Amino acid sequence: MTAYWAEDLALIARAMGEASRARILVALMDARAWTATELAGCARISKGTATTHLNHLVDVGLLDEVRQGRHRYVRLKNQGVADAIEAMVRLSPSPGPEVPTTYRGGRHKQELQHGRTCYQHLAGAMGVKLTALWQTRGFITPAWEVSGAGFDWAESIGLRFPDKPPRPLVRPCLDWTERVDHAAGVLPDLFTQHALSSGWLKRGSHPRSVVLTESGAGRLAGLGLANALGAPIGADL
């Protein structure tokens, strides 16, 4: 049995280990569905090469494909794949995202460190600050459970937990830029998606980065989360 597991591990490691496929997987960590053309741009390769890589990643079970008429989209298979990618990134000796030393690259790096999506929840300084505030206010217990106060607060802003959650409501996830835990799980996922759909957060210059809006800062202050996500990032980055 061990030999079979080793072969499976080697298969997945090879799939993740090719540089262009790694760039594709990191781009898909924003939890959205992408086309081959879009991912080719992110990976800096041709559409044909991207399609070949995507077919391989689908075949080994790392991606799902969704077809809408003539269009084909791909996205990460599930939370387990996202966790594996994040774990691999944390093993890197690099202290932060590897980006070109250009104005655009510097903007990407600053935004990714400030706030980004780790699949469906917040990460970076934003995620760490939000987690710390939830803990301070008693919404998350020291045992990483959602408290009664946490459930009440979530309901008060319109978050609805599933009757049978498919994964923990909250759990620690080591942040690869901040090097401390941020909160992952159902509660952080629901909050992040709600914040994006409500316009409190918006996508930044990088597909995974998120920035706090002026209206979001005001709304969070009204919810008792003032400064939880830092200050809005302006256009002068």
Image (cartoon, rainbow, N blue to C red):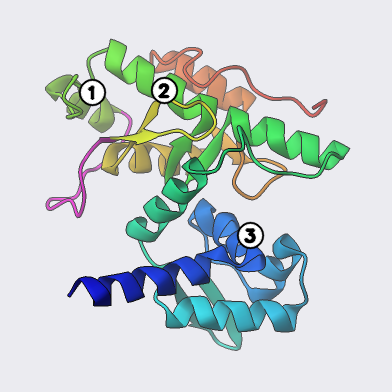
Seen at 69% across and 25% down, the residue is 233
Query: Of callouts 2 and 3, which one flags the residue occurring earlier in the amino acid sequence?
Result: 3
Is 189 placed above or below 49 here?
A: above
Seen at 41% across and 71% down, the residue is 10
Q: Residue 9, how many percent across, how many down?
A: 36, 68
Q: Secondary structure at mark 3?
A: helix
Direction bottom: furthest residue: 70
Query: Of callouts 2 and 1, which one flags the residue occurring earlier in the amino acid sequence?
Result: 2
Q: CA distance from mark 2 to mark 1?
A: 11 Å
Q: Circle 1: is it few (<14), some (14-19), or many (20+) Cα within 10 Å? A: many
The answer to whether residue 24 of the structure is visible from this angle is yes
| Main SS of residues in magenta | loop
Q: Which residue, given by chain and number where applicable, does mark 3 sit on?
A: 23
Residue 159 falls inside the magenta stretch: yes
Q: Circle 2: is it few (<14), some (14-19), or many (20+) Cα within 10 Å? A: many
Q: What kind of residue is marked 1?
A: Ile
Q: Between residues 134 and 10, which one lies in front from this camera angle?
A: 10
Task: Look at the numbered discs 2 and 3 and tell me whether their residues touch, using CB distance below 8 Å.
Answer: no
The N terminus lies in quadrant: bottom left
Q: Residue 3, how many percent across, how many down?
A: 25, 75
Q: Secondary structure at mark 1?
A: loop
Quadrant for residue 209, please give it.
top right
Q: Circle 3: is it few (<14), some (14-19), or many (20+) Cα within 10 Å? A: some
Seen at 48% across and 56% down, the residue is 31
Q: Secondary structure at mark 2?
A: helix
Is 196 placed above or below 16 here?
A: above
Q: Which residue, given by chain and number where applicable, does mark 2 sit on?
A: 130
Checking the image for residue 140, the label placed there is 1
Query: Of callouts 3 and 1, which one flags the residue occurring earlier in the amino acid sequence?
Result: 3
